[in-house]
Amino acid sequence: MYFITHVGLIFFMYPTDIIESASRTHWVPIFIGMVFHLVFIWIYMKGLSYFPGKNIIDIYMEKGKGLSLIFLIPIIGYFFLANITTVRAYSEIINIVFLSETPLWATMIPFLFIATYIAAKGLNVIFHTAFIVACVFLPLFLFIFILSFQNVDWRYFFPLFDIDYSFISNRSYYKSFFSFAGVFLFLGFIQPYHTYDRKKVLLSAILLLPFFLFSVYVPILTFGQATSATFQFPFVTALDSVYISWLVFDRITMFFLISLLIFIMIFLSLLLWMVSSILVHFVPIVKHSYVLYFLSILIFIICVMLPDWKVVEKLFWWNTYFRFYVILVIPFSVLIFGVRSKRKVR
């Protein structure tokens, strides 16, 4: 689950943000982001380990309803904006690559409907669906990912140590953290339904490093930095240039994108399930499924009302504030509460 949902987020907007934020030695911002990723996951899981059998909602509710609202409302805001930007952005990608003549709303309806249906069936169904999807589409995804290196020129990898830290002041770099922060919170929602091994989660996070790295470097090694910076989706464009004579199908991009979009549906269903779980906890008289349907309709209406891609990018940037709240405040607060609860027991 952790691996495939992250993979779905990496290959579209992440390369664009990194290439826009850095003009050379792109491995530096990627590596820094990855270190942050590993650190805040470890802190988060360490904090959760002090509360066996409890989810993040229960942990905050123990501290009082007022304090729980302070911590959980920004999470609701983050999940809600993430749903809007993800549905709209990936629907546009579907239209650009597959359905150029189809209205955007017609693409969003099945995309959102499938994610909502999976979420309404509950966490077990989300996990079982993720397992089936991984078995079917992950080998195809890995095969096409390897083929993407066909046209690379490794000389574009250099200079390797001419480091420029100007990316730190570029807001595109902070937008790229969506690929790191988009998923990890679910680890705090699945208890007591499911347990996980912290070492395996960290291993999954480490295994993502080559995909973060080469989602950026494949277009750079294929076209160069200057040309890659002009593309809306650099990795997809680089993949579109691949030609394999022994394959029956001309465009391997289609199969790659189908795999990623199915991973994204799992991600969306997980987001919807988490935000509805928080809302149902505060309004227990409303059924979980009704909250999901209401959220989906509201997300669809807002997505349709967004006039163009520039507005989507603005929403993406506004969600950066919630994103760093999720990255920094939530893991540290859970850890602090966990340490304090352990001291009280002693």
Image (cartoon, helix red, strand yellow):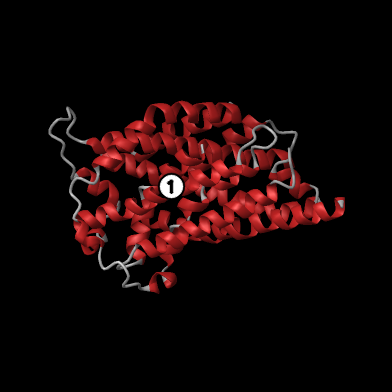
Is residue 157 in view from this perspective?
Answer: yes
* Corner quadrant of residue 193: top right
Q: Residue furthest left?
A: 245
Rendered position, 37 above or below 171 = above
Q: Which residue is the site of mark 1?
A: 208
Residue 201 x, y percent position in the rendering? 55, 43
Does 31 appear above or below 58?
below
Left or right: where 120 falls relative to 213? right
Q: Is residue 134 above or below residue 163?
A: above
Q: Quadrant of residue 16?
A: bottom left
Q: Pinpoint residue 148: horizontal percent, then vertical percent.
A: 25, 44
The residue lying toward the viewer, choosing from 12 and 333, is: 333
Query: Is residue 83 something that shows in the picture?
Result: no
Q: Residue at x 79, y 50 (%)?
A: 65
Where in the figure is residue 287, as x and y percent of width and height? 68, 30
Please, what secondary structure does the residue beneath circle 1 have?
loop
Q: Which residue type does callout 1 highlight?
A: Leu
Side of 240 where 166 appears, left or right:
right
Q: Residue at x 25, y 53 (%)?
A: 219
In the picture, measured across the screen, residue 285 lies left or right of residue 155, that is right
Among the 4 quarters of the image, the one containing residue 230: bottom left
Q: Is residue 345 above or below residue 190?
A: below
